[in-house]
Amino acid sequence: DTGVSQNPRHKITKRGQNVTFRCDPISEHNRLYWYRQTLGQGPEFLTYFQNEAQLEKSRLLSDRFSAERPKGSFSTLEIQRTEQGDSAMYLCASSLAVAGGGETQYFGPGTRLLVL
Amino acid sequence: GDSVTQMEGPVTLSEEAFLTINCTYTATGYPSLFWYVQYPGEGLQLLLKATKADDKGSNKGFEATYRKETTSFHLEKGSVQVSDSAVYFCALSENNDMRFGAGTRLTVKP
């Protein structure tokens, strides 16, 4: 069983550098989500895709953040000009859209980012 | 906007004790409600869910009932085990994005 995978698992970077994270969803899932989780908090929604279309973006997603899902399969999340406040766990989840909503999202292990 | 408020932790219980973790929500429509669990060193896993009022979700001895009249989805377990030690997150989903509570850390001591 291949669940949601994320790479890298850990990333340490210096302030001002760009970083890119990758998420591979469960293969038959058509929805893919990005979240950010800081210590002691629950995950906060960033954005989601249905197939290759980015349908919603949170106001948390500043113009330094960009996400893509070019072929409706894997997704990348890029952060440009990183700031220390970007240090967090970045979580990816995927789901299969069902009529009426309420589908379960399956989460990856996350990428922990530390900006020095 | 939609939001979830859950009981602050940490919660420490002895093995076989009864567990309740409170969760209340605010939503404009009719969300689906979830409990996710995060065991030490692991990712978030779905524990149980309920998609409409009066539904009861259950799994691994845990239960939660979707109460529309009190906008609540409290998590309960009759007899906790050491292996239940984890962080528990209440969440709702209404418009394709999921809103999480801050999490409640549970420690069960033998």
Image (tube, coloured by chain):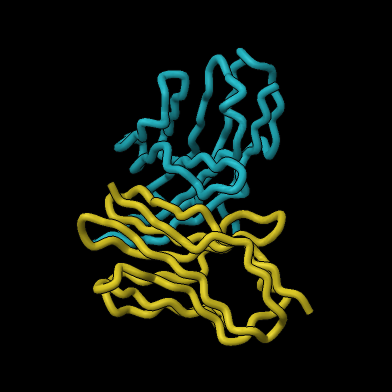
**Where residue A105 sits in the image (x, y, percent)?**
44, 56
Residue at screen point 65% across, 64% down: B86
B107 shown above or below B62: above
Q: As drawn, is B95 to the left or to the right of B56?
A: left
Q: Which residue lies most toward the right here?
A: B110
Residue plotted at (57% across, 34% down): A22
Chain B display color: yellow
Give the residue at x 57% y 41%.
A38
Above or below, comparing residue A77 to residue A109 in the picture:
above
Q: Quadrant of residue B103?
A: bottom right
Q: Position of residue A30 (x, y in %)?
A: 38, 48
Where A85 sits versus A95, above or below? above
Q: How many marks?
A: 0
**Residue depicted at 40% across the width and 39% down the height:** A72
A11 and B10: which is toward the camera: B10
Residue B110: x %, y % from top left: 79, 79
Q: Residue A56: percent from the left, percent from the top? A: 31, 37
The quadrant in which residue B88 appears is: bottom right
Q: Colour of chain A?
A: cyan
Is B87 placed left or right of B59 in the picture?
Answer: right
B42 lies left or right of B21: right
